Amino acid sequence: MKIISQETSKRVCDHMNNDHLDSIHKYLIHYGKISSFENAYMEEINNSYIKINYDGKSSIINFKNEISEEEIHSTLVSMLKEIK
C-alpha cells in the first residue's frame, strides 16, 4: 500500500480545518471521547490514523483498517455517518 505522503496529509488537513471544522469536532467527541475543548484542528492523517490537536494536546483516532490515499475521502465520510 502506498504511504500517505506529508504533502497529502497537509492538503487534507488544511481542507478539513478550513471547510469541515465541525466534522473534526465530531470525530474528536465521538471517536476521541473528548467532550470538552476550546479549539481543535486536524494535525495529521496517515494510513493508520488521524491526529487531532485540541487545546495543545493530541488525540489519535485509529482507522479500523489501514487506508490508502484514494480511500481518505470515503473513510472520513463513512466515519461521520457512523456518528449518531
Image (tube, helix red, strand yellow):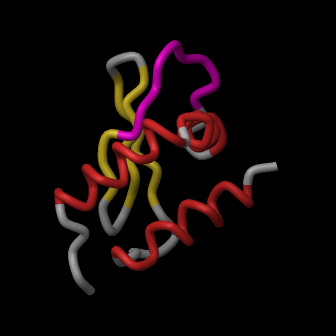
State left or right for residue 30 relative to residue 4: right
74 is higher (above) or lower (below) than 61:
below
How many discs mark residues in the rendered view? 0
Residue that lies at the very extreme toward the right in this rendered image: 84
Residue 1: where, in percent of width, then height? 27, 86
Residue 71 in the magenta stretch? The answer is no
54 is higher (above) or lower (below) than 18:
above
Residue 46: where, in percent of width, then height? 30, 61
Residue 6: where, in percent of width, then height? 17, 57
Residue that lies at the very extreme toward the top in this rendered image: 38
x 46%, y 50%: residue: 61
Residue 36 in the magenta stretch? The answer is yes
72 is higher (above) or lower (below) than 60:
below
State left or right for residue 71 relative to residue 29: left
Residue nearest the viewer, comparing 33 with 74: 74
Residue 35: where, in percent of width, then height? 64, 24
Q: Quadrant of residue 42?
A: top left
x 61%, y 35%: residue: 22
Q: Magenta segment, principal secondary structure?
A: loop
Residue nearest the viewer, comparing 22 with 32: 22
State left or right for residue 23 relative to residue 72: right
Residues in magenta, as a range: 34-42
